[in-house]
Amino acid sequence: MHNLIQDARYGLRMLFKNPGFTAVAVLTLALGIGANTAIFSIVNGVLLHPLPFSNPDQLVRLVFSNRGVGANDIGLSVPELDDLRDRAGIFQDVSVVWPANANLTGAQHPERLEMLGVSPNYFSMLGVSAQLGRVFGPEDKAEGFAEAVVISDNLWRRSFGKDPAILGRRLQLDNDPYTIVGVLPPGFRHPGRTVASDVDVWATAGFRSNPFPKPNRAIRLLPGAIARLKPGLTVDQAQAKLDALAATLRSDYPNNYPPRAQWSVEAEPLQQSLVGDVRPMLLVLMGSVFLIILIASVNIANLLLARASGRQREIAVRLALGAGRGRIVGQMLMEAMVLAVVSGFVGICTAAALLHSMLRYLPAKVPRVSEVHLDWTVLAFAALITLLTGLLFGLAPAIQAVRGDLFSAIREGARGSGYSIRTSRLRGVLIGSELALAVMLMVGAGLLLRTFWGLLQENPGFNPNHVVTAGLWLPVPNNPAADPYAKPEAEASFVREVLRRVSGFPGVQMAAITSDLPVTRTAFRILFTIEGRPAESSPDMAAEISSVTPDYFKVIQAQLAQGRFFAENDDATKDRVVIVDETTARRFWPNQDPIGKRVKFGAAPTNPPWMSVVGVIKDVKHDGLDSDRVPHIYASIYQFPVKAMSVVMRTALPASLLEPQVRREIQAVDPNLPVFEIKTMDDIIGASLAPRRLSAELVGLFAILALLLASVGIYGLLAYMVGQRAHEIGVRMALGAQPGNIRQMVLAHGAILAGIGIVAGLVFAGVAAPVFATLLYGVHPFDPLVFVSVPAVLMLVALLASYVPAHRATKVDPIVALRDV
């Protein structure tokens, strides 16, 4: 212990003795440690930390799919919910989860809230209690919606000023009265997907009576469910029993589960389901930032090797006087560890600042962001990476320092040829490794940047410029008789009046309404049937459906390929008509004219009407710019009414200027309707690309940092080599070597070193490239442009970094070099 303390004090003295070296080393390492710690904080909070519920490994999300037609996550019916509860035999609890909008009325201004419809056992299944009042219980069992609601801590603070007398207060949601019975703890978040943001209100229902239709196995109105497995049951065991249950149901109800649909139920661990979309992005970021700390460590190891070469005679004398090699290695390792500890402390401070900035720019789609912070797990990670970093960059110089010919070192000092050659070779290996790591990171960044740039150039099928949107939600009262928009004629009248008012704004060229905005992935995918064609003849007849007003395609400037647009008289009094996109036409009517063909949605028990195809529209990317073409069918909103709507306006005016006018005019039609999410279509597209933008920008930033570190490393190595070979260079010049020959010699050394590192890096990048595949779209993991341009850029930078030492070598004075022998 005495030796350790003594070595630590000596290490601190060496740091203060060389402030320039210390500053460079600490800043380099602190940046690497800070970046690793900040990214790990996000990975830990989002991916690794268990969900904050009792026995979270028992919680699963149930996913219902028609895999035969490529329709995933289609929801479930009430009878299927009963089957899971009564026949599966694997669940303690099952709860519906229904994210929805709700209109809060009765206050000074109507407000749109995010509501979650759940079963009464939702909170008990999660093991959550209220901070004020109570959560749902058996007393809240109802056929339709129960009167009780539970609100979030955020809504309590935001709208009710933390009023402790909130319990028992009445709310008007979608024109229905509810009573607040509880307020949830501040940290509670629904462990699943939501409509747009965190849930404000939880309501409970039996889903068997108004406003819900009579239970029917063919009507899958419930969007999803979560469940808790029975103790001791694994997810794989549960899945095997679910597969058996699904097979039994398909056999018992063949009309509801046609063979072509291949209906299935899957149990996903709830945490995996919640974070699955962002897992690849975060793991790639973690791997990228880990390469940065490796590159930084190699650079510091090279600096320590350079320092150790200056101490060659000192170490040799100490060994000659009887000092053990282990003692020397231990002391030099302690010096490295002291440097690492100081860098680690600065790195943690850096991580706190980086994390604060990164959380502000994380896409809204990243779940569990509220759980990200610098906790003890993160600090332990920072300490571990600090320790490993110190060992990584300290071990090689320490071992190298005690190797070699003792007497040669004493006689020749720092210029001993044997030691210098070995040191140069080791430094060359380290720099080659650094360049290889830089190549890997730059290839990854190049692939992500190519993807992002390609998406920016992707044709969305419409013109998003000068389009402003505004969201609406028509109420769904529990009593259908109280719904002012229950009849299609009433909703059609509302839609026409809103469009009349909005279209009259100065600066608004045209306006329309749609149920689903492009690139938002909100369109509902359903099965459909083509008249005169057996269902089994085309097993993948499924498409996404959107309801629009006649001018919608003109507003977004989508192109009509064939037929006609909707007309104002395509209403509930006329025959049903639809417009299909080109993907639908090509897939379901190959080499045929789809105009005049008839289709119908849904299954036979619902007795849907036939609809005639009157037009074909060029493909619009409704599922995001990074999605493949998905069949899409458009219906007239006057014939296929919906509750969720978006007003779209073609205008050169900014959204901020239009917002008060849009809100005023819509609420003049219905004062109880909140108007929300008023934004431009460009903003919506930008939000859809936010995860890809973040990963491309961060990995690109790390790649630039790696390039700079690699260039500094190769510059330092060649500068060291020139200094060590000053005598040799002097002799060469005395014997007639020209400056150009000397410059060429040094540049050739740098080029060979860079070439070896680049080739090794390309091999490693080829092995690692498939890891990026999940983050790529329209770009091959072995994209030739990336795999050619990255080596070219790195070689150019390496040659530029080599030029300064090469030029300095030509300035060596032969007389001075020979005199110093």
Image (cartoon, grey):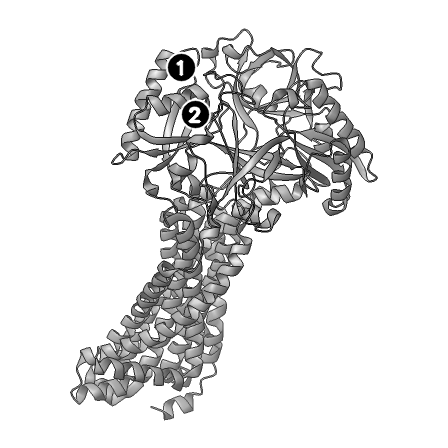
Q: Which residue ends up furthest to the bottom in the rendered image? A: 819
Residue 179 in the image: state x and y as whole percent.
Answer: 56, 36
User: What distance separates the C-alpha of mark 2 from that of mark 1?
Assistant: 13 Å
Residue 416 in the image: state x and y as whole percent.
Answer: 28, 83
If you read the primary sequence from the N terminus, does the residue marked by circle 2 or circle 1 appear first? Answer: 2
State the residue in front, 543 or 511. Answer: 511
* Residue type at tag 2: Ser
| Residue at image point 39% right, 78% down | 720
Q: Secondary structure at mark 2?
A: strand
State the residue in front, 683 or 154. Answer: 154
Q: In which quadrant will I find the C terminus?
A: bottom left
Identify the residue under disc 1. Answer: 259
Task: Tell me if residue 302 comes above or below residue 774 in the rendering.
Answer: below
Can you tell which quarter of the image residue 597 is in? Answer: top right
Q: Secondary structure at mark 1?
A: loop
| Residue at image point 57% right, 13% down | 600
Total numbered labels placed on residues in the image: 2
Left or right of 395: which side holds 202? right
* Residue type at tag 1: Pro
Identify the residue under disc 2. Answer: 65
State the residue in front, 159 or 647. Answer: 159
Residue 798 in view of the camera? no
Task: Tell me if residue 660 comes above or below residue 564 in the rendering.
Answer: below
Residue 469 in the image: state x and y as whole percent.
Answer: 69, 38
Residue 557 in the image: state x and y as whole percent.
Answer: 71, 32
Task: Tell me if residue 759 comes above or below residue 86 in the rendering.
Answer: below
